[in-house]
Image: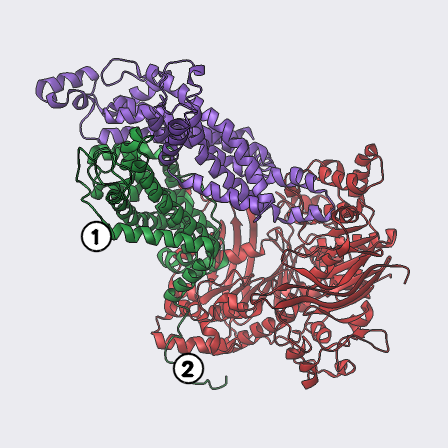
Chain colours: A red, B purple, C green
Amino acid sequence: MADVIIDIQDLSVGFTGRNGAERAVLRNIDLQVRRGETVGLVGESGSGKSTLALAAMGYLKTGLRLLGGQALFAGESMFALPRSALQALRGGRIALIPQNSGQSLTPTLRIGAQLAEALRQHSRLPADAHPPRIIELLTRVRLPDPGAIVRRYPHELSGGQQQRVAIAMALAGEPEALLLDEPTTGLDVTTQAHILELLREINAETGTAMVYVSHDLGAIARVCDRVAVLYAGEVVLQGTTRQVLATPLHPYAHGLLASIPRLSDARLPAALDGRPPAPGDAGPGCGFAPRCALAGERCRQERPALRLLADGQLVRCHFAEQTPTIAVKGARTSSAQSGTGAPVLSIQGLGVSYARARLMDQLLGRRTVGMLTVQGVDLGIQPGETLALVGESGSGKSTILKAVAGLLAPAAGQIGFGDKGRLADQVEQRSRADLQRIQLVFQNPDDSLNPRQTVAEILAQPLELYFGLPRDEIVARSVQLLERVRLGAHYLERLPNQLSGGEKQRVAIARAFAAEPELVLCDEVTSALDVSVQAAVLDLLDELRVQRGTAYLFVSHDLAVVRALSHRVAVLYQGRLCEVGPSAAVYGSPSHPYTEVLLGAVLEPDPDQAPTLLTDDVVESGPPARGCAFQRRCPHHQGDACNQVEPPWQDAGPGHRIRCHIPLAQLLAGPATRQQPAHA
Amino acid sequence: MLKLILRRVALGALTIVLVSLIIFGAIEALPGDACTAVLQQDARGETLLNCQKELGLDRPATTRYAEWISGSLRGDFGMNAHRTKRISELVGDRVLNSLLLGACALAVGLPVAFLFGILAALRRDRALDLSVSSIAIAAMTIPEFVSATVLILVFSGWLGWLPGIVTTSASAPIKDFFPEIILPVVVLSMVMTAHILRTVRSSMLEVLDSDYVRMATLKGVPYRRMILVHVLPNALLPAINVVALTVAWLLGGVVVIETVFNYPGLGRLMVSAISDRDLALVQTVALIVASVYVIVNLSADVLTLLANPRLRTAATRAA
Amino acid sequence: MSTLPAPPLSLPARPGAGQRLLQTLRELMARPSGAIGLLLVLLHVVIALASPWLATHDYKAVSAINILLPPDAKHWFGTDHLGRDVFTRTLMGGREAILVTAIATPLAVVWGGLLGIYLGLVGGRRDDVLMRVVDAFLSLPWILKMLLLIVIFGASTQVLVPTLAFFYGIPVIRIARAATHNVVARDFVLAARARGHDHFTIMRRELLPNVLDALMVEGAMRWSWMLLAFTSLSFLGFGVSPPTPDWGLMVADSRTYLPIAPWAGLYPILFLSTLIIGINLTADALAKTLGVDKAQKAPI
C-alpha cells in the first residue's frame, strides 16, 4: 500500500531473563498505519503497548533488544539506520508525545528554548522566523498567553499545560506521524477531554498519522479510527474502532469491555478473573488461555495465529466466532445500604488548612487558622452506605479523607462519630476504640504495604493492636480475612513484591477489615489498578460492605466507578461542596454547573458519543476569597452575586441539595442531554 | 528571593553563634584554665589567684563570653597564653598560608574531578570508568599521612625532584612557598578530588537515566548538544553542595598534611595550641575554622538557590 | 460464609532474618569487589587477633646494634630505628586500631541511627532544633574535637571508644534521617499512624527494617573513616603511646629514615592500606547488592 507510513513487520522484542533464557515482550507484531489515520493501541500492564510505540521510532529501553522483524517508517527500517539518520527523523517527521510531560521536559531550560531547539533541528524555516513560529505553535495548542509561557520553566506549568507544550514541541518538526504514549494519564477529567479534542483537530487539519497508546477505551473511542488490542505482547484483535468496541470477537477484548464501568449504566461491571501475565512470561499456547471462558486444550498448547474474519477484524483466537456467546457474568446493582439509625459519621462545618501549626497555638491548645483549603463541609454517612467524594485536583477530597482519619487536624468544624459524639482532631488523641472503627485503604498498592513484612505480619498488626489476640488465633483470623478477599491461605507467607497490584490491594482491604470497622475510608483505591482487575476489586468492596454492614467514604475522580458503587455522591470544587445527593439524582438533573461540566467531560467507550466541553481547562491555584468557588469558570455565571455572595443551598429533591445562585427551575431546564452525538 | 537569601544568612549566623557557644562551653568544661596551663606546677594559692585576676578569669563566664565575641567581631582576639603575641597576628599569617594551600588544591583538584567524573559517567562500566572509579576509591580512603609519606619517599627521597619538608617561615611572602608547596597540594587534592569525582559521576549517571534526557534523544537532539545543554547543567547542580563541603573540609581537616610537611598553616597552629594548652588560641582558631565552614556552605546554598530554576521561581513566588 | 479448612497451627515461617543475611552474604561474595574486600578484611582481623602467637620476636625488645637492618632471614621485615622487629610490630600494629574501631562503629551506628530515624519520623520543631545543633557540631573539624577530649582524658581505650562512637555517630544521624524521610513519605507508614500505633512501634516495625540496608552500608564506611581517624591521631602522636605498636605511630617514627630504610614505614602502610581498601570494597559491593544509593558525602 503506497500510503502506509508506519509498517511494523513481524516485530519481536525481548530481554535476557535471569537464567539466560530469552523472554519476549513483543511477539510477531504486524501493524500498519496509513497516512492520516489514527490507530489506537490498547492494553494493560505487561501488554507491551508502550514498547511497541517507541519501537516505531527505532527506540528500545535499556535492557531490551530486537529479536526479529523490523519497524519501517516511510520505507526506512528504523533499527537499521545509523544514529545521524535517526536524529534527523526523530522529533521531525516522526515525533513522540510522552506520558509524563512534566518529567520529559528539561528542568533547566525555558520552554521557549526547548521549542527553539526542536525548530533548529528539524524546521526548514530560516532562524529569524523561529520566534514567531514558536508563538504560533503555542497558540495552536491553545495555550493562553504564549509570550509569557515562552519564558517559563517546565515546573511552573500545570500538568495540562506541560502536555500541550509537549504537543507543540512534537508539531514543531511538522511530523508525518505522531506517537502518543498515554498522553492524558494523570490529568483531570476536563483537561483530558480538551486535549483529546485538540488532537482530533490536529489530525483533521494536518493529516498527521497517529499511534495512540492507552488503557483508556473512552479516550481511544474519541480519537482513533482503528484499534489494535494487545495482550501479553501480541496483537489479539485489530479492527475499526466501532467494531472493536461494539462487537469484539476476542474473549479478552470482550471481557475487558464488560469490565469497564460506564456512566450510562449504574450497575457494577462484570469482573474478569485472574490477571495479565508479567512481561515476558507468556507460556507456549495462547496468552489469554488461563483466564478465558472458551479455553480448550488446543488453546493451551497451540498459539493461535492472527486470522481475518468476515467483517474485516483480525483476531488471534481459535474460537473467535464464539465470543459473543460468553456469558457476561454478574453485572449487578450495588446493594442498597444496610443499616439504619444514627449516622456512622457526621461532618459539620469542616475546614482544613495546610498552614503549619504555630507554636503559640500549640501551647495554648488552639487550632491554627490559615488559608482554608477546605471550607464549610457538612456531610453525613449512614451505616452500611457508600458516600462518594468526587472532584478534580484541588477539590480537597483527599484532604477531607485525611481529616476524618485524624492525619490532618481541622482548622474549623468538627467530626462526630456515631453515638460517641465528637472525634478528636488528631490520631494521637483518639481512643483505641475510635481508631478501630475507622480504617483506611490507600491508592497505591505498591506503597501501602511494608515491603519487608509478610502478609501474615501485615494482617497481624491490627489484630494485635485492637484485639490483643494470642498467636494461634491471629493465624486463624488471618486465614479467614484472606478468604473473604478471595485469596488463599498460602498468601500468608508471601512478601508484597511477590504479589500483583490487584492482590496487594486485596491484602490492604483485608487489613482494613481486620479491625472490623464501621467506616472504611477509600482513597482512589482502584485508580492504580488495571481496568480488568478494577472491576473485581469493586465487586469485592461491595460484597464486604453488605456482609459486614460497613460504610464507605469513597474518594475517586472516576465518575463511572462512583456511579456503580455509591449510594450518595458529594461533588467538590476547590474544597467547597457544590452538590450532594443520591447517585441517581446527582447524575441526573438538576445539576450544579460544575457537575454538568464534569459529567460532560467523561469519555465513554463509545465512538458515537462526544464529550461536551462546557468550560476551559484553566487550573486554579486556589479558591476565591469571596463568593462561589466556581465563579471563574462557570458557564452560567450570574454576575456580581456569584462573585460576592456565598451561594445558598437549594433543596432539589429528597436528600439532594445544590449550592448555586441560579434558581432551581432554571437548573432543571438546563441542557437536556449531556452527551452530544459525534460529528465524525 | 532576597528574603530567602537573607534567611539563609541569618541561619548561618545563628549556626556560628551556636558553634561559638559549643566551643566556649567545651573550653570552660576543661579542668584547669589558662593560668594552670601557663603556671603548671606553680599553679596554686596566691600565684594562681593573682594570675587569674590579671587575666580576668575570675569574672563570670557570661561576661568573658561576651567580651570574647565582641572582641572577635572587631578582630581583636586577645593575647596568646604566654602573652607574647597578639593572636590576630599569629592567626593572620597562618590563615593566608592555609588559604594558599587550599586555593592551589582547588585549582588543581576541581578541574580534574569534574573532567574525569563526567568522562567516567559517559563511558560507564568501560575501561576508563572502572580505572577512574577504582583510583578514586583508593585516593579517598587511604589516610593522608600514608599518601604524604609515600609521595615524600618517592619524589623527595628517591627521585629528589621536590623538597619534602616546608622550611619557609610563616610570615614569608607567597612566592617563597613554591616549589615546596607542590607535594602538600597534591596530597590534599587527592582526597578532595576523589570525593567530588564520585559525586559528579553518580549525579551524571542519574541524569543520563532521566526521562527528559531520553526525550531529548527522541527529539533528535545531537549527542554533543544533549550533554552540554541537557545533561551537564542538571548533573552539576547537586555537585555544588559536595564541592562546598569538601572545600570547607580543606581548611580544617588538613592538620595531618600540615604536620607531615611542616607547613605553617592554621591546622598546625591548632595542634600546637592544643599541645601547649593555649586555650585562648584554641578557642579562636576553632571559631575561625568553623566560621569558614559555615560561610562556605552558606555560599553553596545561595549559589544553588540562584542556579536552580525550581528554587528560584518558588522563591519569587513566595516572596 | 463457607466452612473453612482447619487453619495451620503456627505462624508460617517467614524468610527469616538469618536466611536473609546468608542470602546477602552469598550475593556479596558473587561480586569480585565484594569477595576481595571481605577476604582482605577477614585476613586482617584474623592476623590482628592471632598476632601474639604469630609473632617472631618481642615487640618491645630494643637493640642498639641491630638498628635499621634490611629484611633478612631473622627479621622478615627488617628492624626499625630502635632495633625492634618490624614484622612483629606490623602484625600487632592493627590490634588497638581494629579493636577500638570495631567496637565503636556499631555503637556509633546504633545511637546515630536510632536518633536519626526518630527525627526523620517526628519532624517538626524537635527536628529543626536538633539539626541546627548537629550542623553546628559538624562545622568543627574532627581533629579539634578529638584532640580536645584526648588532651583532657587521655587516649586509653576506655576514652577512645566512647569518644569515637559519639563523634562518628553524628553524621550517621543525618544519613539515617535522610533515609527515613524516603520511607516516611510512603503510605504504609501513614497507614500505621492512622491505625494508632505509637512512634516506637512504627520505628521498630515500619522504619527500621526499611532503613537497615542504608545503615549497614553506612556502618561499613564509618568503620573505614574511624580507622583513618585513629591511625592519623597515632601518627600525630596523640593516639596510642609507645611502645604499643600501631601502624600510624610506626609510620611517624620511620619518617626521618625513610629514604634509607623504607621497610620500617612501608610495611605498616601496606597493611593499613589493604585493610582500608578491603573495607571500602566491601562497602561498595554491599551497597550495590542491597541497592542502596550511597551518595557519599565528605568525611565527617
What label sits on residue C53 in the rendered view?
1
Q: Residue furthest right?
A: A2
Q: Residue at x 55, y 45 (%)?
A: B129
Q: Chain of mark 2?
A: C
Marks 1 & 2 on one chain: yes
- Estimate the x, y position of residue A16 in percent, counting from the top left: 61, 64
Q: Nearer the viewer, residue B100 or C144?
A: B100
Which residue was labeled with disc 2? C7
Q: Residue at x 45, y 85 (%)?
A: C5
Q: Earlier in the sequence, mark 1 or mark 2?
A: 2
Q: Is residue B10 visible?
A: no
Mark 1 Cα shell of 10 Å, populated few (<14), some (14-19), many (≥20): few
The answer to which image quadrant residue A523 occupies is bottom right
Q: Nearer the viewer, residue C49 or A673?
A: C49
Q: Is residue A516 left or right of residue A176?
A: left
The answer to which image quadrant residue A677 occupies is bottom right
Numbered disc 2: secondary structure: loop
Dot 1 amino acid type: Trp
- Estimate the x, y position of residue C153 in percent, counting from the top left: 20, 36
Q: Nearer the viewer, residue A306 or A169?
A: A306
Dot 2 amino acid type: Pro
- Estimate the x, y position of residue A425 in percent, counting from the top left: 44, 54
1 or 2: mark nearer the eye? 1
Q: Is residue A680 left or right of residue B161?
A: right
* Residue A299 position (above or below residue A562): below
Q: Residue at x 23, y 29 (%)?
A: B28
**Quadrant where the image shows the N terminus of chain A:** bottom right
Q: Mark 1 and mark 2: span between their CA atoms?
A: 58 Å
